[in-house]
Each structure stands twice: as C-alpha cells, then as structure tokens.
Image (spheres, coloured by chain):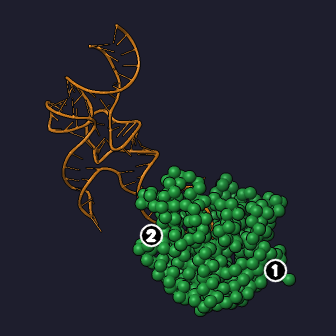
Amino acid sequence: MTPFNWTLDGTDGNARAGTFTTPHGALSTPVFAPVGTQATVKSLTPAQVEELGAQMVLANTYHLFLRPGDELVAEMGGLHRFMHWNKPILTDSGGFQVFSLTQTRRIDEDGVTFKSHIDGSQKRLSPEISMRIQENLGADIVMAFDECAVPTDYDYSRLAMRRTHAWARRCLDAKRREDQALFGIVQGGIFSDLRTESAHQISAMDFQGHAIGGLSVGESKTDMYRTIAEVNSILPGDKPRYLMGVGTPEDLIESVRRGVDIFDCVLPTRLARHNSAMTMHGRLNLMNASFSRDERPVDPECGCYTCQHFSRAYLRHLVNAKEMLAASLLSIHNLHTLVQLTRDMRAAILDGSFEQFAQEKLAQLRNKETEK
RNA sequence: GGACGGUUACCCAAGUGGACAACGGGGACUGACUGUAAAUCAGUUGGCAGAGGCCUUCGGAGGUUCGAAUCCUUCACCGUCCA
C-alpha cells in the first residue's frame, strides 16, 4: 500500500487546504519548505528548523551527488539520518542546475553533462542517474529530472518542454522505491499553449504529485501568475501541486489563491545571509544605519524566536560586525514568516475567509512604506 | 642645538611638474537577491549640480611655473639618530 495519500481538507475558491502523508509524517498544506541544498538549511540546526515550524526541507541531487556522494549518504543510513531531520524531505532532481549552470553544462536528448563546480571534473546526470541518486539519498518526495529553461524563448521553451516530458516518462520507468513519491514537472515557459500541453502530458503520467517548474526565473509577475492559473486549471485536483522555487509572501498568497499547495525557496535563507528580513510589511535591510538604535523587533507582530528576544539594533549590530549569528537569527525569522503565512492561509481556507485574508495581506504588503 | 625621514580625503596608503577630485585596501553608506557555483554581487564615499558642469582640497604661509599633491623658502608637528 502506498504510504502517500492526498486528502483535501477544504477549499476556498481555488485555494486548497490538504494533507499529504509520507513515510516521515504528513504535510499540512499550503506548506512552505525551507531549502537545504547541501543537506543543511544554511546556518540553522534541524532543531531550529523544526522549532520555527517547518514541515519539510529540500535537498539537492546535483550538490549531494558531487559531494559527499549519494552512495556515501546511503551508506550512512540515508539523508534523514545523515542530516538528522526526521520529517519529510524532498530532493530536487538537478533539473534546476541545468538552468543555473549554463556555463558549465551541455544538454543532449539523453541527459546533461556538467562540469563540476567543485573540481572541474565532468559529471553526468540523466533521468535514470537522477532517480538512482535520489533513491540513494532516500527523500520522501523525489522530483523528475527536467529541463528548466529561460521562460521567454518560445522555440527553446518548447524544446525543453518536450525533452522534459520524455525524461519524465523515463523517470517513472526508472523509479524503484515504493517509499518515495515521484512528482512530475510541468514546463513550457510563459506560453499558454506550451503550458497547456505540458500540464496535460504530465497529468497523464502516473505521478504522485505535480510540480510547476520554470517560473520565478526572470519572467514578469503577470506572466507567472497567469501561468500558474492556467496550469492548475488543468492539473487534476486529486494530487498535490508544488510550485518550485517560490518565494515571496506576495507570491505565496497569489499562488495559493490559484491552487498551489507546496512551495520551496532559497529566498528567506539567502536574504537572511544577505542581511534582509522578510516581513508581512515588506523587507527590512538590517544593514541600514537607521536601525542602529531601533529597539523594536524586526516585526512586532511576529512570534518567532528572533522577534521574541532581539531588537533591530542588536541584529543591525550583528550584521554590521559580520557575526554569523545574524544569519541564523534572520533565517529563523524569514522562514518563520513564510511558514506562519502558510499556516494562516490554511486556517483562512478552512474557515472560508481566504479571499478576505489574501486581500488584506496583499494590501498590507503593498503599503510597506507606511509601517516600517 | 644639529642630521636625516615623514605630514595625502573617515582610517591605512599610492602618487614626486600637466592624462589628479587624486590608484589600492579598510571602514561607512545604499541597492539587488525566488527548485542556492550566492555568509554573495553591484554602486556610492570632498562639496554643489538629478546627466560627462562648476567650486574647494594633498600640514600652514609664501614663491617658481602657462600649469604644483609633486620644485624652492620658511614655519609647525611627528619619528629616528648625533650632541
């Protein structure tokens, strides 16, 4: 019997609240998953990640394949044990690296050859290899190996999309472990006909969840939101929908509103390391001199550990002094902000007030200048 | 009292007649970041002027020169050495 089960707990418009069970526990959606590319959410201990409310973390096939190696992780008892995270883990397939490492990779119909950014050696990834690596890593949710491309070039988007479909079938064929859910990825850039074709193709295959890839990579918000809506109008409702690589509080709200259930993004942790705090009133750059003597917490309405105990003045000092605690405290805060937002959205969906909630929060985010 | 060496923008420090508002580093300030080659990257840092324009700078004063941070005189201060 499959350990994976998707149930809809409630809907409000297109917004959905659901539960997805995995061998390491259930996900209550909408859910935001922090990214821990190299089997660590940068600057945080798993205990901190858990305390801030994260239900799942992401790790990356490409990075762990290069170092320390998927077989080593398997030897060490798998990713959960290796990184001491006992809740669900999702591994990305390496597809995004096809997009981000343009200078150091070569694509062919069978797969992708990378030049390792660590030692320059040649590495190969294909649907079969990605699946094998992901099986060794042992995440609960594994992703099909796709080609994420620049979303505004029609001809190339079509090419990448068709390749993604072919690779999706091969991932399904190559998959062996029953305790891993495989999600297929819809591509097609910002083009309605391509996204429609892709959503139908991917839906027709036997995946346990569906992802929307190739967004938030440079296209306009209008195109992004429109694309999400188009794809979700085609994807079946009886499986979870994962929007890859998103993002900001606004994007989370706009996407849940259009039927997305799962998110991941490096933004909160990266911004934290780059001295920015995400709040429901906009971003704060803690490096700014204006916070030198600001006794308020980053966000007075936030319940995170950081906001409960530290002033903007202290964070500004840590940031200014380049102390690594700054990255940790801001990561806790930023992640908490998104996690809390997804919880609030879930509650709003369940009691039928989602649209009102969304309007209110979006207005608040737009008025960020008034309330910093 | 004498002999050398030094004095450059917030700090350190290059520059020794025109291409210098003055290299570089630090610091400070500002911005960017969306399935992490990102504890990264970019810009600003004499004043004014929202477009390449003007004004005031290189310890002080005076001088040489078409032209000086750069040469000369002198004063001040700092350092080392000799009395």
Q: Please tell me which residue is depicted at 44% across the width and 73% down the height of the picture.
A: A371
Give the quarter of the image for residue A100: bottom right
Give the quarter of the image for residue A251: bottom right
Chain corresponding to green in the figure: A
Tell me, for residue A23, which label it has, or none: none
Chain corresponding to orange in the figure: B
The type of residue carrying mark 2 is Lys
- Decide: few, some or many residues near mark 2? Use Cα within 10 Å; few <14, some 14-19, many ≥20: few
Left or right position of B74 against A259: left
Residue A58 visible at all: no
Q: Nearer the viewer, residue A284 or A169?
A: A284
- Chain containing mark 1: A
Tell me, for residue A372, which label it has, or none: 2
- Decide: few, some or many residues near mark 1? Use Cα within 10 Å; few <14, some 14-19, many ≥20: some
Q: Please tell me which residue is depicted at 54% across the width and 85% down the height of the picture.
A: A357
Q: Position of residue B57 (x, y in %)?
A: 25, 41
Q: Which of A363 and A97 is in front in this view?
A: A363
Dot 2 and dot 1 within a common chain:
yes
The type of residue carrying mark 1 is Pro
- Chain containing mark 2: A
Q: Image height check: is A222 above or below A177?
A: below
Left or right position of A242 against A135: left
Quadrant occupied by the N terminus of chain A? bottom right
Tell me, for residue A3, which label it has, or none: 1
Q: Which of marks 2 and 1 is in front?
A: 2
> Considering the numbered disc 2 on the image, is that residue within a helix, a strand or a loop?
loop
Residue A281 visible at all: yes
Q: Position of residue A34 (x, y in %)?
A: 64, 69
